[in-house]
Amino acid sequence: MNMKAQLTTSILFIFALFLLGHQPLSAQDQVMSFTHTADDDKLEWGSCPAFMTESCRIAVLHGNPANPNADVFFKMQGNTTVPAHWHNSAERMVLVSGEMEVKYEGQEAEIITTGSYAYGPPEKPHRASCLSDEPCVLFIAFNKPVDAYPVEGTL
């Protein structure tokens, strides 16, 4: 994918996430706590960037994905793979359901299971595969705006 296409894909992805996460809040709502589960009917699931698997979905849990410090659920169907990509932000993750293999460039693949914490460094290419028959749902906290850029080739 050429640089212009990557930029266009990233801009569209951030805009779509902004629309999902942009909900005006009153002053009182801003100080209220809340909880969500991965199967919460109130979650609005949006598409992932076009280069990712079609079964991939993202739901904004907190914050605005166009700004720093957004939290999301990332979901992919069982037995699917998200191709190699990278983010400007570090990722702090907890697997909520399923079993996932994550492979970072220059490292051995790791298997993460439900309840596992994983850290992904900023700008480090990686791929992920949902190994289970059930969907994999990953909680991800980003410290920079949410983005994703495809990587040519394999890791």
Image (tube, rainbow, N blue to C red):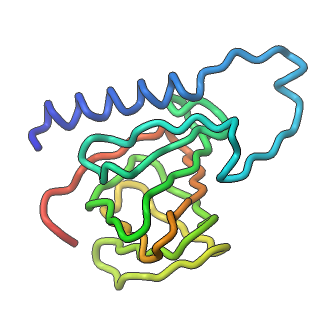
Q: Residue furthest bottom?
A: 108
**Left or right: where 139 falls relative to 14:** right
Across and down, in percent, residue 76 comes to 44, 57
Quarter of the rendering occupied by the C terminus: bottom left
Quarter of the figure with residue 34? top right
State which quarter of the image contains the N terminus. Answer: top left
Residue 56 horizontal/vertical position (percent): 40, 50
Count of labels in the image: 0
Residue at 72%, 52% in the rendered image: 37
Determine the image quadrant of residue 102.
bottom left
Residue at 62%, 44% in the rendered image: 71
75 lies above or below 129: above
- How far across and down, in percent of the image, does residue 11 sit? 32, 27
Q: Residue visible at 29% across and 78% down?
A: 106
| Of residues 117 and 50, the one drawn nearer to the viewer in this rendering | 50
Image side of residue 122 versus residue 68, left or right: left
Nearer the observer, 16 or 5: 16
Identity of the residue furthest to the left in this view: 2
Q: Is residue 123 left or right of residue 110?
A: left
Residue visible at 51% across and 64% down in the picture = 136
Decide: is 20 above or below 76: above
Q: Position of residue 15 (x, y in %)?
A: 41, 24
Tell whether 71 sits left or right of 147: right
Nearer-the-camera pick, 56 or 112:
56
